[in-house]
Amino acid sequence: MDQKTHPQLPLIGRSSDARPDSAGEHWRSLFSGVWGALNVKPAVEGSISGSLYSRKIGDLTFNRIEFGNQQFEKSHSRTLSEEPFFSLSFPESGAAQCQIGDRTVRLLPQNTYLLNNGMSAKLRVEKDYSTFNLKIPVSALEHRLGPNSGILARAVVQPDAIYHMMTRLIFELLQNVDEADDRTVAFMTNQMMETVAFFLTSGDSMSEDSIAVQAAQARVLAYIDASFRDPELTPQRIAAACRVSRSYLYKIFSDGPSVMERVRQRRLEAARGMILHLGDRESLTRIAMTCGFSSSSEFSRLFKKQFGVAPSRM
């Protein structure tokens, strides 16, 4: 992305705002506020430098980050209140070495990367590196992409209509969020997530059949996003609403979670979010029903299976 034409983000802080002897600790504190607990140290001899510009809109956080002479490490372990997230990164200048799990990649301009920060992550910058990125909850993309090993990479080859559409949606959301109501922001965010998923999983070598499958999946996932709270949602209803046969619906989700498993995952993630935000202000039974579960016992069983803890213990 072009730093000159991109909407400005508020400055959160810079390493230069602190005294030289505390610049590293100051930067670690700033960066941890967005990325969670991590360890930061110089990559080579010298001082750490960095700046962070950031804005949170709904569940998404938009960041522009400048790194200088630093390496950080984020462990896989986290508290129950820390939801795992993806970082959708658009490098603007310089280069960085990134390791997610057991895979390592060099982050370079003219490429886009989806980094799974729910896994162990390391980043090393010896000189300077700047990037624009989106912090996206795993729940917002995982049901669209399927299981992710850690890193997805796409070269930006112009002209690329999908890339252009994706960046325009990002720009429009940032530029218009103050005038938009919650319903409009939710709609724009959903459209942006669909375009991000399509961009990351598509490419110039895709066949027409593959594009048709991607388009059908996008329609179905958008419908699930809008309808998962309906306890009577069935494959038949989903297929009819998305104008596909039930057999084709099963086919396009044969590689990965089934369509109803994706519905359950969406309901569970929504319920988890409500529990974290509302706490004891709403009963678990009410949350379960609001998110589309037919009984509180079914909800508790599936929740514990998914997250390893009973909803009452969150």
Image (tube, helix red, strand yellow):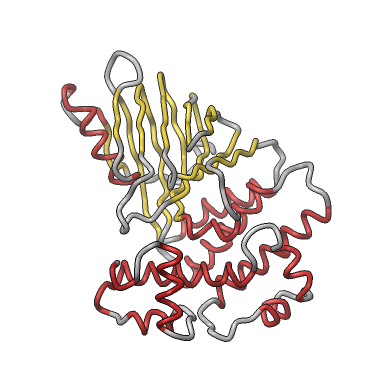
Looking at the picture, tell me which residue is in the foreground, 229 or 147. 147
**Image point (76%, 60%), residue name:** 213
> Residue 278 location, x and y as percent?
29, 73
Q: Position of residue 186 (x, y in %)?
A: 49, 67
Vertical placement of residue 186 versus 200, above or below: below
Residue 171 lies left or right of residue 158; in this view the side is left
Say whether residue 51 is left or right of residue 302.
left
Q: Is residue 65 left or right of residue 293?
A: left
Residue 227, percent across and down?
Answer: 56, 78
Q: Nearer the viewer, residue 243 or 184?
A: 243
Q: Nearer the viewer, residue 222 or 181?
A: 222
Q: Quadrant of the C terminus?
A: bottom left
- Nearer to me, 157 or 277: 277
Determine which quarter of the picture holds residue 309.
Answer: bottom left
| Image quadrant occupied by the N terminus | top right
| Picture quadrant where residue 59 is located | bottom left
Q: In the rendered view, would you say 282 is above or below 168?
A: below
Residue at the spot x=26%, y=35% of the render?
Answer: 28
Q: Can you say whether 313 is above or below 71 in the image?
A: below
Give the tally of numbered discs: 0
Query: Residue 161, how many percent across, how many down?
Result: 70, 48
Q: Is residue 150 left or right of residue 157?
A: left
